[in-house]
Image (spheres, grey):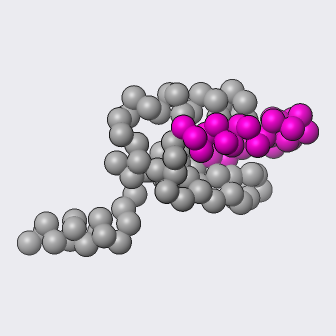
Amino acid sequence: MRVLLQAHLDTAKSNDVIQSGKMPQVVKGLMDKIKPESAYFTTDHGVRTMYLVFDMEDPSQMPSIAEPLFVELGADLDYTPVMNADDLQKGLAQMG
């Protein structure tokens, strides 16, 4: 299932990770793990934020994805099922 992962990073913890030089490895580890079809990095509500769209093959993946973000970056996370335009058209066609 295509999922949008929104990760809002704790400023103090992410500052520490950036200053230690480990942020590139943390981000690369996440990218290698979930292989997102798209990834965006910005600020939202005044904090560093990641928006990652990826295919979640099984809900049991959630803990292994979330825990490093919780522990290393103090992140608040949301997983949201999402559709692209093709998915929407397919869903609308099924309505009859």
Q: Is residue 34 above or below residue 95?
A: above
Is 28 on the left or on the right of 96, as rendered? right
Q: Residue at x 64, y 37 (%)?
A: 29
Q: Residue at x 59, y 57 (%)?
A: 39
Based on the picture, tell me whether residue 76 belongs to the magenta stretch: no
**Where on the picture, by quarter, is residue 66?**
top right
Q: Is residue 96 above or below residue 1?
A: below
**What range is drawn magenta here?**
7-33
Q: Position of residue 56 (x, y in %)?
A: 40, 42
Q: Position of residue 47 (x, y in %)?
A: 75, 52
**Where on the picture, by quarter, is residue 30?**
top right
Q: Residue at x 81, y 35 (%)?
A: 22
Based on the picture, tell me whether residue 13 belongs to the magenta stretch: yes
Instruction: Tell me, yes or no, if residue 48 can be seen here.
Output: yes
Is 68 on the left or on the right of 62, as rendered? right
Q: Is residue 10 above or below residue 46?
A: above
Of 73 and 55, the residue lying toward us? 55
Majority secondary structure in the magenta region: helix
Residue at the far right: name it: 19
Of 3 and 8, the residue lying toward us? 3
Q: Residue at x 22, y 65 (%)?
A: 91
Instruction: Tell me, yes or no, if residue 75 can be seen here.
Output: no
Residue at the far left: name it: 96
Instruction: Tell me the quarter of the image containing the C terminus.
Output: bottom left
Q: Position of residue 86 (x, y in %)?
A: 31, 70
Is 36 on the left or on the right of 89, as rendered? right
